[in-house]
Image (cartoon, helix red, strand yellow):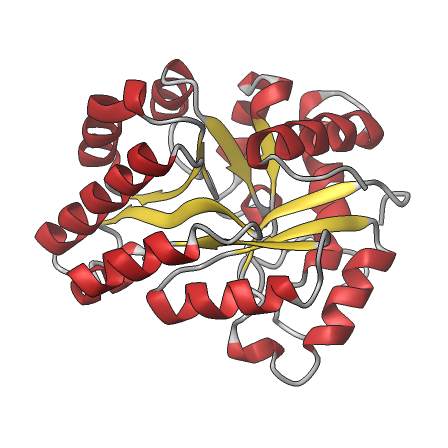
Amino acid sequence: MTPKLDLIDIGCNLTHDSFDRDREQVIRRATEAGVTQMIITGASEQGSEQALELAQHYPGHLFATAGVHPHHAADYTDATDQRLRELLTAPQVVAVGEAGLDYFRDFSPRKAQLRAFERQLQIAIDTGLPMFLHQRDAHEDFYALLKSVREQTSKVVVHCFTDTREALYDYLELDCHIGITGWICDERRGFHLKELVADIPSNRLLVETDSPYLKPRNLRPKLKSNRNEPRVLPWIVGTIAACRSESPELTAANSSRAAREFFDLPPQ
């Protein structure tokens, strides 16, 4: 792996049950690898509650988001909306989301996805908090809805970006930040990202693992488990840096500075 860096993983699903047996060790390994702060993704009402609870056990080190992923949009109710607003008052919760649209899986009907996304956009408008957004195979609807309210929202990150050059420039024109994961390390489907990542301004490039998903396929040495962990973030940053023709230290410093500003995180 690359030398130890000061890194922030802006999206990891550490409440996932695959971490139940060794969550404390996973967090320790990440810290030892230079991942000094991590943001735990809230993807459902219950998951958001769990993300906050975990963050409260690691003050200044772990933070959380609160939101409902489009996969769970059919479960979004008035009570859910109220509960998210309550969770977002906690100092450890730094963004609204994971919210957005996913037409690749369609685990929830598209009308339900649109409705849940609209309601969470309204929460972001009302609270002034940043948004942590998900979009897959839904760029047209996602972009149109986000653009319609963009002047009313504060900061926005389109996390785990895997889309086209046109989509990237649409988001950059809306002054969005872009989250890059280990997808860029996948020779089968991430090749186009190797060219696009150089187009992202350094002050709007954020890095993430999306653990336990998206373990880098080119990771050396390989992890024994198929589960991804935040400790591999330095490897992802090394790949990004190579694609941008800059040093891993520069990529790390810029992304961490951007993340701390975006989420209003304390210094380490």
Q: Nearer the viewer, residue 145 or 235?
A: 145
Task: Report the quarter where the C terminus lies.
Answer: top right
Q: Nearer the viewer, residue 199 or 23?
A: 23
Q: Nearer the viewer, residue 2 or 120?
A: 120
Q: Residue furthest left?
A: 111
Q: Residue furthest right?
A: 3
Where is residue 64? Give x, y as percent: 54, 55
The reply to whether residue 33 is in sight is: yes
In the shown orientation, is residue 105 left or right of residue 190?
left
Q: Residue at x 9, y 51 (%)?
A: 111
Where is residue 224? Give x, y as percent: 73, 75
Where is residue 256? Give x, y as percent: 71, 34
In the shown orientation, is residue 191 left or right of residue 79?
right
Q: Quadrant of residue 124?
A: top left
Q: Residue at x 75, y 42 (%)?
A: 7
In the shown orientation, is residue 97 left or right of residue 235?
left
The reply to whether residue 76 is in sight is: no
Q: Quadrant of residue 31?
A: bottom right
Q: Nearer the viewer, residue 64 or 168?
A: 64
Where is residue 247? Give x, y as percent: 82, 26
Above or below, comparing residue 25 to residue 196 in the picture: below
Q: Residue at x 41, y 24 (%)?
A: 168
